Each structure stands twice: as C-alpha cells, then as structure tokens.
Image (cartoon, grey):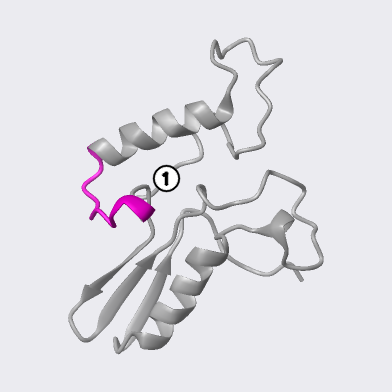
Amino acid sequence: LQWDDHEVTNNWSDGKDLSADDRYKVKNVPLLIARATQAFMECAPLRNHGDEERDRVYRAIPYGPLLELFMVDMRIYRAANSANLQDRYDAASHFLGPRQLDWLERSLKQSNATSKIVCADMPIGLKP
C-alpha cells in the first residue's frame, strides 16, 4: 500500500499553487494534504508509529530469513516539484527526506535477510 500522486492533487507537493485552478474550491494545499492524509490513514491497514510519526507510511516488512521489503514514501517528505536538475543533495532536492533516508540506510544495514527489496511508487535511479 503506497501513496499515489493523485491523493491530494495531480503531482502534488507542499508548494503546489492551485490559485488559478478552477477545479478546486479549496486552494490551500497544506489543508488538502492534511485531509487526504487523514482519510488515507483512517482507511489504510498500516501500523501506527505513535503521535510523532502518526502519518508515517514508510516501513519494513520481513518475510522470514530470506526476504525483507522496504516500503518508501515518495510523497510526504519530498521538496517542491521542479525540473529535478539539482547538482547536489539539499533541501530543494529532498525526495525521501532526511529522516526517512536515515531510516532506510540504517534498516538496510541492520537487516539479516538474504534478499532486500526497496519498494517505491516511482523508479529510483541516477541521471547519467
């Protein structure tokens, strides 16, 4: 179970501007994000991570000694949409966000599974 980029608006991020989009009566994207997140979390069968991370979707799912899945969230922690041509990792290029990226690196290192699969809703790669 993963976020899609249509849960709030098409290809959404915190910085999306809906002021000229007549399809939306509510133009406040953070409010739309909060509403969509609440609906998603109320209906999704995800483990609760406590108040500090109550909207957390990223998680690890072990399947015995051979396999562990690492589900990442490529929506909540990302920076505003851009052409994605940044030449360094900074606040403008965050995709997983520092907290999730730290969790992923730490979890992959600590996992004893033979196979480790990172599950993402979009391809992950480096531009040549």
Helix or strand or loop: what does disc 1 sit on?
A: loop
Question: Which residue corresponds to mark 1?
Answer: 3
Quadrant of the image occupied by residue 11: top right
Task: Report how many numbered discs are placed on residues in the image.
Answer: 1
- Asked whether 33 falls inside the magenta stretch, the response is no
- Residue at left 45%, top 42%? 4
What kind of secondary structure does the magenta stretch mostly adopt? Answer: loop
Q: Quadrant of the C terminus?
A: bottom right
Q: Is residue 12 above or below residue 84?
A: above
Q: Nearer the viewer, residue 113 or 100?
A: 100
Tell me: 123 left or right of 87.
left
Tell me: 118 left or right of 25.
left
Q: Is residue 126 above or below residue 10?
A: below
First to last magenta residue range:
43-52
Q: Is residue 73 above or below residue 104?
A: above
Q: Is residue 61 above or below residue 14?
A: below
Counting from the top left corner in percent of width and height, residue 36 is at: 41, 31
- Residue at left 58%, top 23%? 28
Tell me: 93 left or right of 11.
right
Quadrant of the image occupied by residue 65: bottom left
Counting from the top left corner in percent of width and height, residue 74 is at: 51, 53
Label 1 is placed on what type of residue? Trp
